[in-house]
Structure formats: C-alpha cells, structure tokens
Image (cartoon, helix red, strand yellow):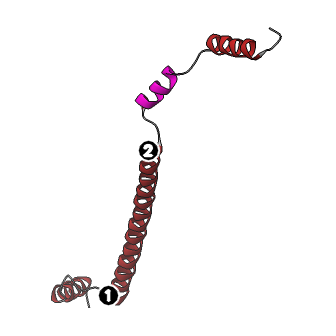
C-alpha cells in the first residue's frame, strides 16, 4: 500500500469519528483536572469565609469596646476639672495649718 493511500485512509477514519469524542485516558484526565479545580475553588472560598468571619468578630469586639469607652468630650470635661499642682499644695498647707493645734 502506498503512502498516499494510507494517508487517505487515515484521514477518512478521522472524519468518521466525531471531533468531540476523546479517548478514555483523555476523558479520565479531564475529570481529574476538573475535580482538582473544584477542590481548589472550594478551599479558596473556605479560606475567604474564615477571613470574613474573623474580621466580623473583630469588628463586633471593637463595637462593644467602643460602647464602654469615654468620648472625647467626656475626657475633656474630666481634664478641665483637674486641679493643678500649685492649687493642691496650697490646699494641703491650709488644711494642715488649720488642724495643727500648735500653729
């Protein structure tokens, strides 16, 4: 059989087989790749879910802490009523002199 005749026979055999059919090995490899891809996607979404959940808990903790913290106005009001050092020393001396029976 000549080369051209074998080539023609081979070309005709390829035309008869639909192009979408694959060998069993190629089909099995495709299924394996697909399941590996699904596993990767599932693991990625699981990691994303864990990160979002942890951030949600952190935000919730911050919100509860902020409820118990003083506001800037409350801190300013507390510092405005603070006595300076000279006033406290003079007040202590006055109390001491009043309570000293010898003085």
Magenta stretch: give its range. 73-81
Q: Which mark is residue 68?
A: none
Query: Can you identify the residue that label 1 sits on?
Result: 23
Q: Earlier in the sequence, mark 1 or mark 2?
A: 1
In the picture shown, does residue 62 fall above or below 72?
A: below
- Identify the residue at image location x=39%, y=71%: 42
For image coordinates 44% across by 44% down, the residue present is 66
Q: Secondary structure at mark 2?
A: helix
Does residue 78 show up magenta in the picture?
yes
The residue identified by callout 2 is 66
Q: In this view of the protein, which residue sits in the foreground, 49 or 72? A: 72
Give coordinates of residue 103: x percent, y percent.
80, 8
Q: Residues within 10 Å of mark 1 (few under 14, many from 20)?
A: few
Q: Is residue 98 left or right of residue 80?
A: right
Q: Is residue 71 above or below residue 45?
A: above
| Cβ atoms at labels 1 and 2 below 8 Å apart | no
Q: Quadrant of residue 74?
A: top left
The residue most toward the front is: 101
Q: Quadrant of the N terminus?
A: bottom left
Within-10-Å neighbours for mark 2: few <14, some 14–19, many 20+ = few
SS class of the residue under badge 1? loop
Q: Give how far apart the Cα atoms at labels 1 and 2 are.
A: 64 Å
Q: Comparing marks 1 and 2, which lies closer to the viewer? A: 2
Q: Point out the residue furthest to the right here.
A: 102
Please name whichever residue, 64 or 44, is drawn nearer the observer in this view of the structure. Answer: 64
């Amino acid at each position: 059989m000549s080369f051209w005749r074998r080539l023609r026979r081979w070309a005709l055999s390829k035309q008869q087989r639909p192009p979408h059919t694959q060998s069993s090995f190629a089909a099995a490899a495709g299924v394996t790749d697909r399941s590996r891809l699904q596993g990767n996607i599932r693991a990625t979404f699981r990691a994303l879910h864990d990160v979002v959940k942890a951030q949600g808990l952190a935000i919730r903790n911050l919100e509860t802490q902020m409820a118990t913290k003083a506001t800037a106005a409350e801190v300013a009001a507390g510092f405005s009523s603070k006595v300076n050092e000279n006033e406290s020393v003079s007040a202590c001396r006055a109390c001491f002199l009043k309570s000293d029976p010898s003085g």
